[in-house]
Amino acid sequence: MSSHAKMKKKKKFRVMSQKVKVFRSKNPLLSVLMWGVSHSINELSHVNNPAMLMPDDFKAFTKLRVDNHLFNKENFPSHFKFKEYCPLVFRQLRERFGIDDSHYAASFQSPPLVMPSPGRSGAKFFISKDKRFYVKTIESEDIERLHNILPQYHHYIVEKHAKTLLPQYLAVYRITVDNKETYLLVMKSVFSSKFKIHKKYDLKGSTVDRQASTKEKTKENPTFKDNDFTKDNAKLRIGDEVKKDLLQRVKDDVEFLTSLNIMDYSLLVGIHDADLAEAGNDVDDFLGGVDSNEDSEPESPREGDSPQESDSPGEAEMLYSDTPPTTPPANCDDHRERNISYGSTDLDMREDEDDTEGFQSVDENRRECYYLGIIDVLTFYGAGKKAAHAAKTVKHGIAAVQWRASVRQMRANGEQRENFWLTSPRAGAEISTIKPENYARRFLELMERIFE
């Protein structure tokens, strides 16, 4: 064959189709959450961060519907909707709380872990695999409540420069899969992502039904309550100066909650014991009871990658990179070092710059660090709580009101003291469902008692 013929011969080109990488989890809800966080952060990276938020920003939302029959349902839902509430507001809140958006997105590149529900609400809880962020399912009524207080909450966080024990709300999403809507609230973890929590307390200042149940105590890391704290003779020893500053911070937080007619919140306490940590292997076990989703093989996009919306309305294509990242963003390795002194021994606690800060114990005999946060702040004292207050007062409080009269009558009849009706005269004040002002007063009294 002549050289001229060779030159005229057509080359055969092999069409290379890009591999489609999707976020995979056994739970379709988590797959969409992972995808949605990545998509949202990428979209926000192209939007200027305004110096001042407008009233409409507190009502805004973004919504996306995805229909793509080429998806593999075993890995990712083929049809879903993703809605984000007030994206500019929550971006500013993340910034105020010192959370870089790239770090936030990176935390959801692996399936979050399923946690046992700690309460009676029926809500589901998840935690990011790096243990920085909690995700809680909430009801549409909670969305409305949060919407109503979001302007005040944002203003308070800005005013206090994020120096608060209030929950750090980072995002709110609505995910629709198989025509079922799920609302998700993302919060920063109260606890450190690096150090095991050896004991937990949920404290309200109430004593009625405020002890861990038998079922709760069987858990690997149970959450104890007020009566357990008293029974343990527990104290959080942080020193007079730190106590003064902390109590002022809590007082400001509680006054803010009271101004919004909020009650029934509690102080979540996590205790890290350095001696126990050194005695055992505490690396990845500090929460206990989580579902590691080991059957899932998450496939994450590179940072900044995002689905490209097609020309067809309501459709989106997943055009992800072939290879997930092998290294974190450049600033992910920046650390700050904090030496916490435990008596005569210094424990080097090296934290990521957006990790949760703890309070060191000043007790020379106990090398402990305390992690604190006020939680469950979306309960308003409305008609339902007033009815609950009345019911609990009948059950626990009326007897207390009648106690003195009963004792006087029994004394008049000559009965012995051991036969007196010894209902505590404080029972009415000890139930948890009380008016916000009274709740706040009792909560602050609790704070005075538990810290030294």
Image (spheres, rainbow, N blue to C red):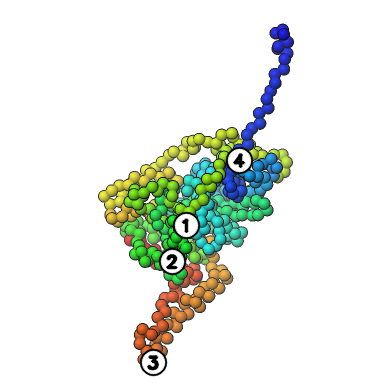
Q: Residue at x 51, y 61 (%)?
A: 119
Residue at the spot of label 3: 413
Up-down: is 244 above or below 112? below
Q: Residue at x 57, y 40 (%)?
A: 299
- In front here: 196 or 291? 291
Q: Nearer the viewer, mark 1 or mark 4?
A: 4
* Amino acid type, residue under disc 2 in the picture: Gln
- Nearer to us in this view, 91 or 393: 393
Mark 4 lies on residue: 22
Residue bearing mark 2: 211
Report whether 218 appears left or right of 382. left
Percent position (x, y) of residue 430? Answer: 44, 72
Q: Mark 1 or mark 3: which comes first in sequence?
A: 1
The residue closer to the viewer here, 443 or 202, is 202
* CA separation in Å, label 1 and label 4: 35 Å
Q: Earlier in the sequence, mark 4 or mark 2?
A: 4
* Disc 2 to disc 3, C-alpha distance: 37 Å
Q: Residue drawn 49% across and 71% down?
A: 434
In this view, 239 is above or below 314: below
Mark 2 closeness class: few <14, some 14–19, many ≥20 residues within 10 Å: many
Q: Which mark is residue 166?
A: 1
Marks 4/2: CA–CA distance: 44 Å
